[in-house]
């Protein structure tokens, strides 16, 4: 039993060391570029086209079909690529509008019933570089919200819908293959390399960390460590007890989630048995903006309100709501009663005096 416990501890510690090394390497050299092209139309017309380019979770720019204009979100990118380059990209997207119109009409006839309703076609492409070397790329072709084809770095198209088999020869033709490779290198990889070699897209932001402890209704001790507002997204949160690594309870994580301001959020929770007080635990955070691992101790006292306090607040809110509702109903009744009396005085006049004969 003791051997298994030690083996489990060493295994967890070794995995943690690997995670730390991977985190630091990823923060220093790993970048991702994503492009999304969306077309909406019918068998008869093209209604809308838009394109967006996102690198390391930051939007670089977008293209609007209505204005036939590229909007650059980061001003210094115009200086980096120069106006002529961006103008050429705009002309290229305008040319693609005609191709998108043909594809929309073709697929409307051959994939779905040609009943004139709107259809949506999407092309999603992404590429990754590490230390300036391309390590991966993907392309997804989506029709009306369903993915029909997908291709990875190995260059083999995967058919995800049976109807897609009859169009596979088009995707595998030399012309489309050469076009795909050129576009992936020129517009996905090369653009990313040029940007990363010039300047950071966004200033790095350290995480804001909150650590709390409370007792669950079952008596278990719940430790929570929240990191938010950080950029880039690579981060590591781990629990230590008395400065040592280990496996003490049930650990869960939200995963790294985006915030609305292009920063990120992560919560890691540790559930301990009732016999463990939750004391002497620390949340250790590693991020590129934290030059050394930051240690955040678990507070001695619970940081979340007791259940009876929350229940009392809910009861008081319900009483207040019912009181306001009762007052409103009584007021409506009084108002309707007064109105009825007033209407009766006008609707029941004395009998008219008969005219003389």
Image (spheres, rainbow, N blue to C red):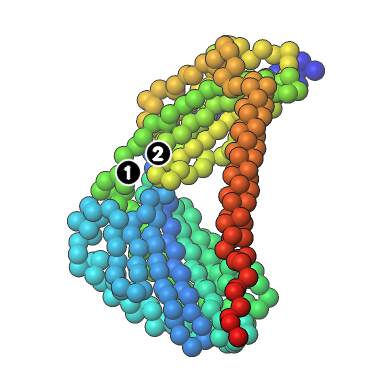
Residue 223, x across and y down, in percent: 61, 22
Indicate the quadrant containing the N terminus: top left, top right, bottom left or bottom right: top right
- What residue sits right under mark 1 in the picture? 202
Few, some or many C-alpha atoms within 10 Å of disc 2 (few <14, some 14-19, many ≥20)?
many
Residue 198 place in picture, x, y as percent = 25, 48
| Residue 172 in view, yes or no | no
**Image quadrant where one finds the C terminus:** bottom right
Residue 231's disc is: 2
The extreme right residue here reads 1
Q: How many marks?
A: 2
Q: Residue at x 63, y 35 (%)?
A: 323
| Residue 209 image point, x, y percent | 46, 26
Q: Tell me the residue at 35%/63% (across/down).
A: 62
Left or right side of 313 for 118: left
Give 49 or 175, whichever is nearer the viewer. Answer: 49
Q: Residue at x 31, y 47 (%)?
A: 201
């Amino acid at each position: 039993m003791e051997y298994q416990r030690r083996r489990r501890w060493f295994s967890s510690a070794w995995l943690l060391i690997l995670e730390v090394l991977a985190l630091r390497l990823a923060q220093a050299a790993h970048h991702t570029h994503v492009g999304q092209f969306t077309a909406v139309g019918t068998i008869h017309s093209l209604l809308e086209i838009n394109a967006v380019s996102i690198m390391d979770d930051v939007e670089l720019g977008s293209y609007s079909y209505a204005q036939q204009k590229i909007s650059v979100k980061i001003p210094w990118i115009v200086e980096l690529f120069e106006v002529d380059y961006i103008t050429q990209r705009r002309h290229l997207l305008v040319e693609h509008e005609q191709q998108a119109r043909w594809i929309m009409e073709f697929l409307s006839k051959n994939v779905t019933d040609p009943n004139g309703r709107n259809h949506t076609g999407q092309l999603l492409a992404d590429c990754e570089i590490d230390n300036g070397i391309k390590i991966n790329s993907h392309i997804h072709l989506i029709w009306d919200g369903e993915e029909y084809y997908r291709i990875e770095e190995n260059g083999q198209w995967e058919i995800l819908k049976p109807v897609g088999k009859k169009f596979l020869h088009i995707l595998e033709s030399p012309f489309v293959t050469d076009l795909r490779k050129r576009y992936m290198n020129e517009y996905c990889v090369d653009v990313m390399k040029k940007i990363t070699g010039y300047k950071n897209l966004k200033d790095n932001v350290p995480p804001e960390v909150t650590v709390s402890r409370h007792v669950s209704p079952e008596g278990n001790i719940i430790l929570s460590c929240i990191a938010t507002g950080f950029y880039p997204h690579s981060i590591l949160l781990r629990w230590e007890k008395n400065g040592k690594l280990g496996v003490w309870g049930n650990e869960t994580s939200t995963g790294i989630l985006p915030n609305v301001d292009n920063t990120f959020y992560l919560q890691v929770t540790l559930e301990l048995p009732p016999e463990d007080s939750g004391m002497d635990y620390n949340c250790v955070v590693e991020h590129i903006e934290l030059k050394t691992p930051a240690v955040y101790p678990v507070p001695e006292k619970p940081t979340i309100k007791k259940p009876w306090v929350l229940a009392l607040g809910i009861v008081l809110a319900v009483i207040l709501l019912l009181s306001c509702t009762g007052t409103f109903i009584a007021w409506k009744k009084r108002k309707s009663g007064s109105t009825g009396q007033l209407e009766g005085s006008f609707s029941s006049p004395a009998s008219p005096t008969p005219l003389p004969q």
